[in-house]
Image (tube, rainbow, N blue to C red):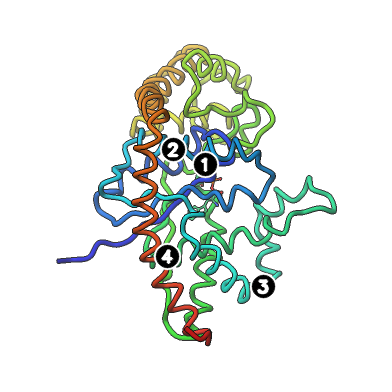
Amino acid sequence: METKKVILSGIQPSGSLTLGNYLGAIKNWIKLQDQYECYFCIVDLHAITVKQEPKDLRSKTLEVLSIYLACGIDPEKNALFIQSHVPAHSEASWLLTCSSYMGELSRMTQFKDKSQSQGESIPAGLFIYPVLMAADILLYQTDLVPVGQDQKQHLELARNLAERFNNTYSPTFKVPDPYIPKEGAKIMDLQEPTKKMSKSSDNPNSFILILDPPEVIRKKISRSVTDSIGIVNYSDDQPGIKNLINIVCAIRGITQEEVVDMFKGKGYSEFKSYVAEVIIEELTPIQEKVKELISNKAYLEEIYKKGAEKANYVARKTLRKMQKKIGFIQ
Ligand code: TYM
């Protein structure tokens, strides 16, 4: 029997998931789950690099799992697990930290962005964060990592750390490739369309949440920032409109030209109504399933326990290899 190639990806339960998380990550996982052996985790260890309210962290972790399931990830075929349930992630992260350089970690743009507002008290976890992400990936001998554009640099670091370890000791890790979708790779902020849409933004009008009700989606899209050109065009001079076109393309699987053609001679308000309905049509069935799943704690527990069992087995095996090569007595 031919063994399937391996996929791993994860999302932080640090807030409510956005349309960016859905189109940049989850929607592609669904497409890939039949061809690959997949590990999808909820990265709670990553979430605590910034302050979290324990009660919220618990509820968001289960919400993210419900969203994975509601979007169509099959728990029979894939391992769905919570990162902190697999201690090998933290241990491997330390081992990799010892072969990481301050210089390469300082160059991570996400670290630079996130640490900017923290003054003198930048949490060290924010700095080490990409090494933990590398551990997540390398422990499973992952071939492919489906993520949005913003994670590309972190993935490059994971590749470098894998190669460095392999060269220092002997071949231990597969060197993973990124999988970044053509459409949906970078959904932009609705208020400042030159910035990535992010769940950590202070202005709720700048993002759409997977669980936003239809009337909220209509309001947020109608208030989204456009321009004074007034023609639906796919152009860098119209970043707001370009972003809305990208959203439609990523959801519907159609081309930018098709969207532009549909709105020849029509105004922004008609276009925005269309965009809102496309999003609502995509998200409503997911929201209904989340509502059912979230109250079924026993079912969710069954899934994350089974996922952790499988993940622990694979991750521990790689961790043991690392420890042995480093020279630890086993
Ligand atoms: P996180 O939680 O910030 O985002 C989860 C996934 O969503 C994608 N994404 C977007 N895609 C398109 N447009 C956007 N506006 C947008 N915002 C977010 C992200 O690229 C990501 O794929 N460090 C990671 C989580 C992580 C991980 C891993 C990912 C930890 N370990 C191992 C892959 C493999 C993060 O913070 O993603």
Circles 4 and 2: CB atoms closer than 8 Å: no
**Which amino acid type is shown beneath numbered disc 3?**
Tyr
The crowding category of the residue bearing disc 2, from other C-alpha atoms within 10 Å (few below 14, some 14 to 19, many at least 20), is many
Sequence order check: which comes first, mark 3 or mark 4?
Answer: 3
Q: Earlier in the sequence, mark 1 or mark 4?
A: 4
Rounded to the nearest angstrom, the CA distance separating label 3 from label 4 is 20 Å
In the picture, the quarter occupied by the N terminus is bottom left
Q: Identify the residue at horizontal 77%, vertical 54% (top origin).
A: 122
Q: Is mark 4 within 8 Å of ligand 1?
A: no
The mark closer to the camera, 1 or 4, is 4
Mark 3–mark 1 contact, CB under 8 Å? no
Q: What is the spatial separation of the Cα atoms under label 1 and label 4, in whole angstroms?
A: 21 Å
Label 2 CB, ligand 1: below 8 Å? yes
Residue topped by disc 3: 101
- Residues at marks 3 and 2, CA–CA distance in whole angstroms: 33 Å
The quarter holding residue 224 reads top right
Q: Which residue is mark 2?
A: 23
Of badges 3 and 1, nearer the viewer stands: 3
